[in-house]
Amino acid sequence: MGVEKPKSKLSAFITRACRLPKEVAGRVGNLSDTMAKERLKAIQSQNNIPYKYLTAAILILLYLPWMISLTCVIPPQIEVVFGSEVDSESYSNIISTSEVGVTHAVLLNTTPFSFNGDWELDPNRYWNQYDFYSYGWNDSDGYHFTSSPSDYADIIVIERTMQIPIANYSELTVSAVFEGVSGSAGIFFEVFADDARAVQEDLFLPGNITTVNVTAPLSIAKLTSDSWLCTIVYRLQIWVTEESHVKLRGIIINAEFTGKMSLVQLDFKSTDNTSFYENPYMKFAKYAPRLAIIQNNDYISQSTYFPNRVDDEIYLPPGTYEGVAYWNLATQDPPDPYNSSTWVPNVNFVVTEDIVMEVDVGLFAKRIDFDVSPSVLLRGLSLRFVDDFQYSESTEISGSTVYSQIPDYLYIPGEIESLSIWLSTWSYLDPQGGYGWVPFEQFRIEEDITIGSNNRSRNLQFSVTLPYTTIGGVLFGLGEFVILTVILLLVVGFLISLRRTLRYSDIRHRLSDSRILPLIMLSAGVFLPWSIQLAQTTNSGYDGVSWFSWFSMPFMIRWSDSTAIQMLLSTPDWWYASLSFTMFLFIPLCYGYLSLVSIESDKFNKTFALALLLPYLVVLAYFNQPALNLGTISLGPIVAMAALPVWLLTLGLRKLGITT
C-alpha cells in the first residue's frame, strides 16, 4: 500500500524542511494541529467571558442580605376581639381542716432536684449563659450539670423566695446535696433574711457526696425588721468548670418554730376560680396582686404578703388576720390601715393551733390572650397601663436553650379601661440576642387599646398576623421570596455563563484538569452549612432552638420546638460578612472556573493558588465571631479550606508520576 501521505500542510512542510520520514512527520503534524485547535478554543472561550454578568452579580451579592428587610414593608395585621364576660365581684373563700399544729416543719423538699417551679432561674437579676438544653438534664437521682466544651466555666444561678413570720421562727436552715462526677465544680450559697445575709462556699471532687448547709441570719433580721413578715431569699450559684460534671441531688429547707404553728395555703384567683399563677409568667408582672395584712388587730404590724405560685404555703401562729387584697399598681400606694377609704378588708380568717387552712382570694381580672400567627420566636412583650410598663420581659437564647418569658396569656386588673401592648418579633439583624438589646421599630408592634365601659368586664384576645406565608413549615415573606429568587437567578446565570464560556474546550481536558475538584469543593463550601445546631429532644424542661447557619452568605434558618422555620441574618455584622464573601470567596471562585478556559500547564499556577487561599480569610472572619460555638461548626468552612490542600496534593502526586 506504500507510505500514507501527510494529512496536513504542516506535516508536508515538516517533511521537506526536516527531512523526516513521512510517518513521523504525519504524527507530529496531527499533534500540532490538535494543540493549535485547543489554543484556538481557549482564545474563543476567553472572548466569551461574561464580564458584565460578573459585575452585576458582585453588586447584587453585596446588597443581597439587605433584601430580607423587604419583609417589613408589609405591616402585620392586628385584631383585638372582646370575648366572654367575667364576674366583677371579688371574693375570699376559706376552707379549714383539722390537723395538729407543729413546732418544726420541712418547708420544701426538692429531692431529687428538678426545675419544677420550686426553684427558678432569675434572668431579671442574673444573666444565665448556661445551655440547659445541651448540657443539663433531669434524672431519677437529681439534676445533672455538665460543662460546655467551648467555655472555661459556666455559672448557673437558681433562686427561691418565701416569706415567714420571723418572730415565730427560732431557726431556718437549707441543705443542698451535691455529687461530683468528674472535673471540678463549686457553689456559692447565699441566704438573705431581709437585708441580712449568710453565705457558704464549697468545692466538689469526683466521687464525693457533699452536703452544704446554710443557716438563715434570723437573729440579725429580727433586730432590723420593721415588719412581722420577713422575706427570705435562697440564691444558689453553681460553677461548672471545663470538662466537669456535677449532680445536684436535692435541696431541703427545714424550720424550727418558737411554738405551735399551722399551715395556711393562700392563692390569688380570677373570679372564674382560676389561679393567676397557673401561668408562671404572672410572677414577672409588676402589678401582680398583693395582700396587705395585719395580725391580731395591730395596725402597726402591717405587712405585705406576695404569693407567686399556686397554693403558696406559709406557717402562721394562732391569731386573727385581716387583710386587703389589691393590685400592685405603680401609681397606687398599698392600703393603709389608718385610712378608712383605702383599708376595706376583703380577707379575714382566724388561725388556731389544730387546723390547716386554704384561703382563696378571687379578684376582678380580665384575661388577655396573645395569638401570633404564624408561630415564630418572639423577642419581647410589654404591657403599659396606668402610665407605666407593668409587664416588660424579653426572650434570650443561650446555646440551644430558649429562655422565653413571652406568655400565651396574662391577667390584668379588671378596672383597667385602656392599655398599650408592645410585641417585638425577632430582628433579622440580631439573630442570637445579647446584652443591651433595643428593639428595632420595624420589628415592634405597638397597639393602643381602649376597652371602654361596655367591655370593662370582658376578656380580650390580641391577635397578630405576621406578613409571612408558611410552606412546608418554612416562613416566606416578601424579603425571603426576593432573596431566594435572586439566588436562583444568580446560580442559573452562572451556570449558563460557564457553559457558554467553556463550550469550545475539550471535555477530556477539563475532566483531567487538577483544578476541577478543588473548585467543586470550594463551591460546596459555599452552600454547605457552616454551623448546625439541632435540639431534637427535650431533657431539661426548656425549649430547644435549632439552626442551619451560613456565614458565607450570610444567612441562617432557625426554629424551635414550637415555632416554624424562619430566615435571619447569621451575624449582626452582615455587611462585613457579605463584603468578605464577595471579595475573598465569590470572586476567587469565579476566577477559578473561568481559568478552566486555558489549558493547564506544568508550571505552578500562582494566581489559581491565591484564588484557593483567599477563602481562608472568610473562614478566619467566621471563627472570629464572638458568639461562635465551636461545637456547632459544620462542613462548610472545612470543605472550603480543604480545597487548597487537595489541589496541592494532586499536583504533587502528578509530579511524582503516581497519577497523570
Image (spheres, helix red, strand yellow):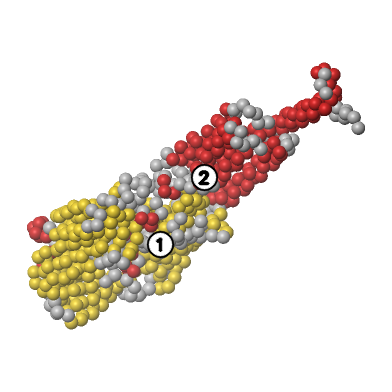
Q: Residue furthest top?
A: 17
Residue 21: % across, % down: 83, 23
Q: Residue furthest front?
A: 1
Residue 136: % across, % down: 34, 58
Compared to residue 613, the image places residue 319 above or below, namely below
Disc 1 target residue:
538
Compared to residue 379, the image places residue 314 above or below, namely below
* Position of the N terminus by quadrant: top right
Disc 2 target residue:
636
Residue type at tag 2 = Gly
Residue 310: % across, % down: 29, 70
How far is disc 2 from disc 1 in space, using C-alphas? 27 Å
Residue type at tag 1 = Thr
Disc 2 crowd, CA 10 A, few/some/many (<14, 14-19, 20+): many
Residue contact at pointers 2 and 1, CB within 8 angstroms: no
Left or right? Give the position of 171 relative to 56. left
* Residue 619 appearing in the image: yes
Q: Nearer the viewer, residue 77 or 429?
A: 429
Q: Nearer the viewer, residue 642 or 565?
A: 642
Residue 441: % across, % down: 45, 48
Q: Which label was assigned to residue 614? A: none
Q: Nearer the viewer, residue 305 or 659?
A: 659
Give the number of the mark in front: 2 or 1: 2
* Position of the C terminus by quadrant: top right
Residue at screen point 54% across, 57% down: 474
